[in-house]
Image: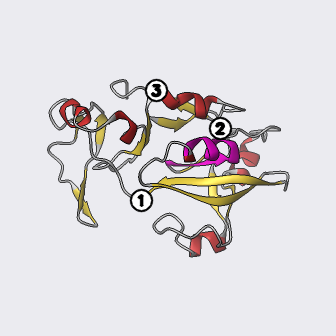
Amino acid sequence: MMRSVDDERIPSLSPDRNTSERKYDIRQFSLGESPFIFVNGALDYNKKRGVPSLKKIPDVLFNGLDLLIPSAMREALLELNISGLYMHPSVYIHDDGKWYENYWYMSFVEGFDCWSRLRSDYDKDGEAINLGGFELHQIYHYAFNDDLLKSIPESQRLLFKMGGSLDPFIVCHESILNIFKSGNGNGIKFIQVGDC
């Protein structure tokens, strides 16, 4: 699973007003439409606490659990023809006002529910939230449904968003980790399923 590193200097992305009003996080847009624009939503909070801004921003930034990735990573992912992967041109405006226009918002059309109800630790007593016809659970410790994964070719599960979870993390197969580790990838940490 991919998560942001624990460093309060890493930008905490927030969409600008126009991007937010477009409901960028729940619908898809064509490549010809204007880019999404993000800023560091924690800038003022960090200034008050004396947390300095980063001089060099990471290649991978997080907007919740979705990612902003640079063009080079996008190109590598396009070659893999990953099912359900959605990417849209994006801009990140850093704390110093500099625009970074080579980013792509990366998310998935839908999640892949492949966690084990027998081996995962989740809130079995609490009622699942039904959202859009999907049951979402609070999961504390993930374990894969091995039988389900074995029934699907590896090439079709290299990268996906975890389904059936209130926290739909993006999961990356170890064979393509190098794509996300390339460049200045210090904004991302990888947690093996079973360790989270």
Where disc 3 sits, the SS reads helix
The disc, 2 or 3, on the residue closer to the chain's N-terminal end is 2
* C-alpha gap between disc 3 and disc 1: 22 Å
Q: Residue at x 42, y 59 (%)?
A: 109
Q: In this view, does 36 lie above or below 93?
A: below
Circle 3 Cα neighbour tier, 10 Å, few/some/many (<14 / 14–19 / ≥20): few
Q: Residue 62, percent across and down? A: 58, 46
Amino acid carrying label 2: it is: Glu
Residue flagged by tag 1: what amino acid is it? Val
On residue 174, which mark appears? Answer: 3
Tell me the distance, in whole angstroms, between the alpha carbons under discs 1 and 2: 30 Å
Q: Name the residue under label 2.
A: 8
Q: Give the range drawn in magenta.
A: 65-77
Q: Determine whether 118 is above or below 60 in the image.
A: above
Q: Is mark 2 on a helix, strand or loop?
A: loop
- 71 in magenta: yes
